[in-house]
Image (cartoon, grey):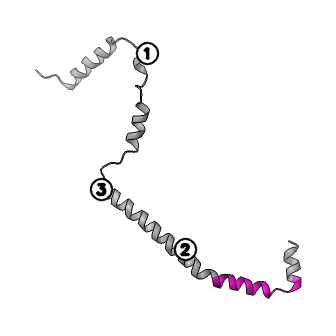
Amino acid sequence: MKSTPAQAWQKLTTAARRAPEDTASLQAPYGFATRVVAQAFAVADRPVAQMIEGLSWRALGISALIMIAVVAINLSPVLNSIDDEVTALTDDEITELASI
């Protein structure tokens, strides 16, 4: 006859109460922390997530290249406009800026 879950639970708790208390068994086994960390960082079989992750890294690289290109293209006009503003300053304005 098969026991019910309540009866099985009762048997398990009774056996646990009778078990001797051993302080050595309370410690984690050797290498337990290493196994836990290894399993936490293990690559799971998630092909869709891995595909999206690979595409996102590629998109990040492409966007960084585009950003560098845009900055390089627009750097010259920005520097020229700053140079024009500096050359247009009068001596009084330069003295005022230097005193700040």
- Picture residue at 32% right of the left edge, 16% below the top: 16
Dot 2 or dot 1: first in sequence order is 1
Amino acid at dot 3: Pro
Dot 3 or dot 2: first in sequence order is 3
Q: Position of residue 72 (x, y in %)?
A: 58, 78
- Picture residue at 37% right of the left edge, 45% below the top: 42
Circle 3 or circle 2, nearest the eye: 2
The residue that label 3 is drawn on is: 47
Q: Is residue 58 above or below residue 97?
A: above
Q: Position of residue 50 (x, y in %)?
A: 34, 57
Task: Give the left or right position of residue 12, taking residue 63 as reference.
Answer: left
Crowdedness near tag 1: few (<14), some (14–19) or many (≥20) residues, C-alpha within 10 Å: few
Q: Are marks 3 and 2 in contact (CB under 8 Å)?
A: no
The residue that label 1 is drawn on is: 23
Q: Is residue 34 above or below residue 11?
A: below
Amino acid at dot 2: Ile
Quarter of the image with the C terminus in it: bottom right
Crowdedness near tag 3: few (<14), some (14–19) or many (≥20) residues, C-alpha within 10 Å: few
In magenta, the rendered stretch is 76-92
Given the current orientation, which residue lies at the most extreme left position? 1
